Amino acid sequence: MPRKAQDVTDAELAILQVLWEEGEATVRMLVDRLYPTRTTSDLATVQKLLKRLESKQCVVRDRSGWPHLFRPGIQRDDLITRRLQSTADALCGGSLSPLLANLVNPLLTNLVKGGRVSPEEIQQLRSMLDELERE
Amino acid sequence: MPRKAQDVTDAELAILQVLWEEGEATVRMLVDRLYPTRTTSDLATVQKLLKRLESKQCVVRDRSGWPHLFRPGIQRDDLITRRLQSTADALCGGSLSPLLANLVNPLLTNLVKGGRVSPEEIQQLRSMLDELERE
DNA sequence: TTGCCCTTAGACAACCCGTCTTTACAATGG
DNA sequence: CCATTGTAAAGACGGGTTGTCTAAGGGCAA
């Protein structure tokens, strides 16, 4: 039996990152950003990756103009959620709260150690705490 | 370039799940649990998967007895943490707190909708809240 | 020894993924 | 209009993974 195809591969993700940042892009822009060599085959590679992303509904292709315009068909948060869920499916019987426990504890210990937790992360924790308490 | 090998594959994970549950097992026990047909090749398959898990340090093989005994070389929580971190690396520049936000919000909305959140999950959220407040 | 099960090494097909080649097509400049 | 340039589309390809399977050797008990 073959391995399960991962939703979005690393090379595909690199393209999505640019699209998330730029909002939209042509093939040329993507090649310039990701494959500075700009070989002929680099361009074909990006086309292929875009095609696969399109078939996964992770990219929307606007064929009305020339050249085609590409836009993200999925938001970063959605992809995060999808990966979290698949981790939960594989390791927690589909339940998300064990992930929460696994996430909160390391962040807390880092807080205590005065370690690598940035002020923004601390702020984020606080606001989430507030939100939880408001319920 | 080939895809990145996933740390633990699905078939390997099935073995780990049994080891986590039982604490230790022989090849025979694992085959009985996972491959009821008990073919000759099923046994070889499990051996192969165990060997790969061993080389990844995810399983410890006790060769002192006969037949060999296999124990988990990694805990479920460690694997969860590893996958969370790799999701964070791919999508959040390595920072874990965006995952937290992505996790808390769905759980909250499910709470509000009175939906599919189990009482245990609610309880877990409460205790984590307590823990947060104690800091 | 005989028989049985376990161990070990390796072959194998199916598949994935990034790359590359090739051919056809749209637009622009002369 | 033709030639050039850049894009679109289809597909081949190699190296790698993953689960399965075959084959041969080794430990244990009767």
Image: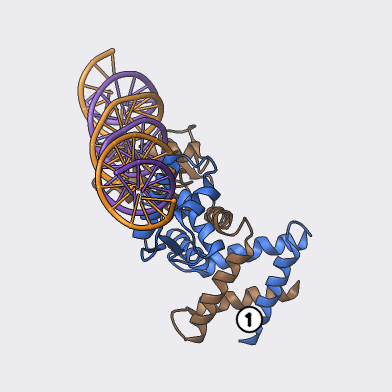
Chain colours: A brown, B blue, C purple, D orange
Q: Position of residue A49 (x, y in %)?
A: 39, 40
Chain under disc 1: B
From the viewer's perspective, is residue B92 above or below residue A55? below
Considering the numbered disc 1 on the image, is that residue within a helix, a strand or a loop? Answer: helix
Q: How many marks?
A: 1
Q: Position of residue B95 (x, y in %)?
A: 47, 69
Name the residue nearer the viewer: C23 or B97. Answer: B97
Quickly name the residue at label 1. Answer: B132
Query: Does A73 sit left or right of D24 as displayed?
Result: right
Q: Position of residue A91 (x, y in %)?
A: 55, 58
From the viewer's perspective, is residue A56 above or below residue C13? below
* Circle 1 residues within 10 Å: few <14, some 14–19, many ≥20: some
Query: Does B118 sit left or right of A128 as displayed?
Result: right
Query: Does B120 sit left or right of C6 as displayed?
Result: right
Mark 1 residue type: Leu
Name the residue nearer the viewer: A102 or A30. Answer: A102
